[in-house]
Structures are given as structure tokens and as C-alpha cells.
Image (tube, grey):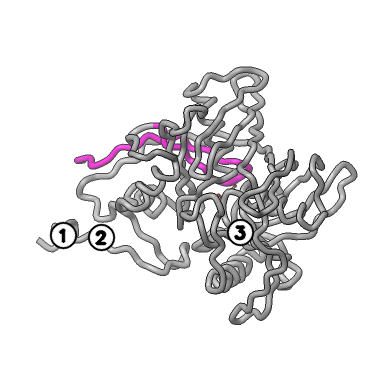
Amino acid sequence: MHLARTINIVGAHAEGEIGDVVVGGVLDVPGKTMFDKMTHFWTRGDHLRKLLLNEPHGKPSRNVNVILPPCDPRADAGFLIMESEEYAPMSGSNTTCTTTVLLETGMIKMQEPITTVTLDTAAGLVVANAECEGGKCKTVAFDNVPAFAFALDFEVDVPGIGKILCDIAWGGMMYAIVDIRQVGLKLDSEDGKRLVEYGEKIKRAVQAVTDPVHPENPGIHGVTNFIFIEPLEDDGSGKKARNTVVVSPGRLDRSPCGTGTCARMAVEHARGLLAEGQSFRHISITETEFHCRIRGTTKVGDYPAVLPTVKGRAWITGVSQVMLDSSDPFPEGFRIGDLWHAQDKVRPDTHHKDVLEI
Ligand SMILES: O=C(O)[C@H]1NCC[C@@H]1O
């Protein structure tokens, strides 16, 4: 074995959604902000994301976080979030995994009963308050960046489906949100393939007609994520609802999706259906929950916005060392259409292909 790369990873999941964390083997990159660092990774070949997310090292349901020194002096750590189709500016499940890993591995000193960890992300500062007991990080409640709605009841004509009304909102990622009753599907695992097919189609139709731009960072634009929601119900002490997020290129988020939840909270607040301080339980396709509330309001550019807090749990699943042999024909991996709804089939790179042909 002749190694080209060795990366140390602590595996984790938050409420069912994988959020593995790179704790060694990746050096810092230049950047005045975490957004700059994210752009650096993305535009300089994107090798790490392709290696860790694509097969054979990765899989469609994997997300990987990279811990880096923060840019903002107020933060304890910085991290970048790698997902199958993009670097997410923010992510709720990944924040929950990363905070848990930082505390349970001792990279940040755990203090019981609450440890506050300030994280620098490509979307801005996020403060996580972790309930800790006996060395275990029991819950992570993070104060997300402000969330807001770009448009309510935005009509889009979807080929093969027809006219659909969706809300377009930012919650750390950009979402199109659709009431599932419009498409006649069930928010159940057994409808999983059709939920993905419909969600991807609607998202592409939205992308074709609108390109929302974050007012404070024009580098963040375009709807990249999609949510099917069931309506809010009153649970006696607050509101609850089920949802599922379709993550490109085609799978369902196993968690209730933190950024999607925040985008939805902004929409429900704009409609007068979720008040400041009211509790809100968002339930996933795996029946796991995030417990949330709006802790205040603000403005982002000209948009009225909410300050969302989301609480969930994460568990460490293992420790691994990813190795890339220098003769491996797939240093950036590949995607096959059976699992990936793959648009592009990655071939071995030229160098290794040449070696094979000799
Ligand atoms: O919790 C979230 O925000 C997300 N989960 C995977 C996709 C999104 O980043």
C-alpha cells in the first residue's frame, strides 16, 4: 500500500442523519471568513468532498464535516459542511454532530450541565448550547442564523406534475417548501422513491424560474433543497408537524433537517401560524424530532426574519481512518445511477487510466 492521503474521522449521526466529522488529516486553507474557506475547497478541485462523499469511500446518505480554525475570534471552532451536491453554508444535523464530537472527544472541554460552543460557519456564527451529563452530550440546542421567507405561495409549473404552490425560504440553506397534500403522496418511507422523484422535479422547476439571493452574501443564491410538509397541528403545549427533506441528487434526510426546520419556522411565522416563544416539534421520516422555538425577530436586508433555535441529539458511531492508495483508480470516487440518480458517471482520472493502459 502506498498512501496518497490519510484522513481521521469520528462518525456520528443526529436523529438518524449521518454527519461524520474530520478531526485530522486536513490542513487549514486561506480565507478571511468561513465562506471564503468553503469557496477555496469548492473551487480548487473539490477533491476532499468527492473522495469522502462519492463511492467507494462514501454513500448517498453521508455528510462530512471538516473542523478548521475559526475566522471569527468569537468562535471556539470553525467547520465546513460537505454534502452530496454542495457545501452547505449551514446544516442543523451536521451542527449537532459536530458539537457532539467536539465535546465527547475532548477537542473542546465539556462543562456540565451546559457547555456553550460558538461555531464559525460559512453562513455566520452559530451558538450551540449542549446539555452534558457524565461525559455525554445529551442534547444540542443551536441558535441558528436568522431565517426568512423570500416568497409565500410561489406558483411553479412542474413538467409531469402541474401547477404547484411553494414557499421559498432561507434557514441556513435555501429551500422550496411544499404542502404534500398538493401531490397526493404519503409522508412515509414506503412512498420514499416517489417523494424523491417529485421533490427533485419540483426543485428543478423552481430553480429554472427563480434565483433568490441572500441579501447579506450574494455568493449564496439559488434553491438547493426541498421540503414536503404536513400541516401544523396543536399538541396542547405548542405546534408539531411532520416533514421530509429531499436532498439532491435523490434521497430523504433521515433527521427532521435543522435548516429546513428553520426555513419552515420563518414561513409559519410570516403566516401568523407560529408565534415567538411557542414550542414547535418537527418530526422526520424516521419519526425522530427536533424541538424548536423562535427566540426573537430581526431583519435580513429588507426581509422580516426570525431567530430560530433547534434542539436535537447526536451519537458517535465509530472512529475510522480513510485511506487513499496512490494506485486507486477512483481518487474522486464515482456515482452510479442505481443509488445516486446519477447525472454524471465519474471515470478513473487520466493519470490512473494511463497507468492501467500500460
Ligand atoms: O439538518 C440539516 O440542516 C440538514 N440535514 C442534511 C441536509 C441538511 O444540511
- Badge 2 is on which residue? 348
Residue under the image location 75 percent in, 41 percent down: 293
Residue under the image location 37 percent in, 32 percent down: 24
In the rendered image, residue 11 lying in the magenta stretch gets the answer yes
Q: Are marks 2 and 1 in contact (CB under 8 Å)?
A: yes
Disc number lying in front (2 or 3): 3
- Badge 3 is on which residue? 175
Residue under the image location 61 percent in, 78 percent down: 158
Q: Is residue 114 above or below residue 270?
A: above
Q: In the image, residue 59 lies at what x, y percent? A: 45, 53
In the image, the segment drawn in magenta is 1-23
Of all residues, the one furthest to the front in this rendering is 302
Structural crowding at the residue carrying mark 3, measured as other residues with C-alpha within 10 Å and reported as few (<14), some (14–19) or many (≥20) = many
Of all residues, the one furthest to the left in this rendering is 358
Tell me the kind of residue under disc 1.
Answer: Leu
Front-most of 147 and 242?
147
Give the spatial CA distance, label 2 vs label 3. Answer: 34 Å
Q: On the image, which quarter does residue 184 sit in?
A: bottom right
Disc number lying in front (2 or 1): 2
Q: In the image, residue 297 lies at what x, y percent? A: 72, 44
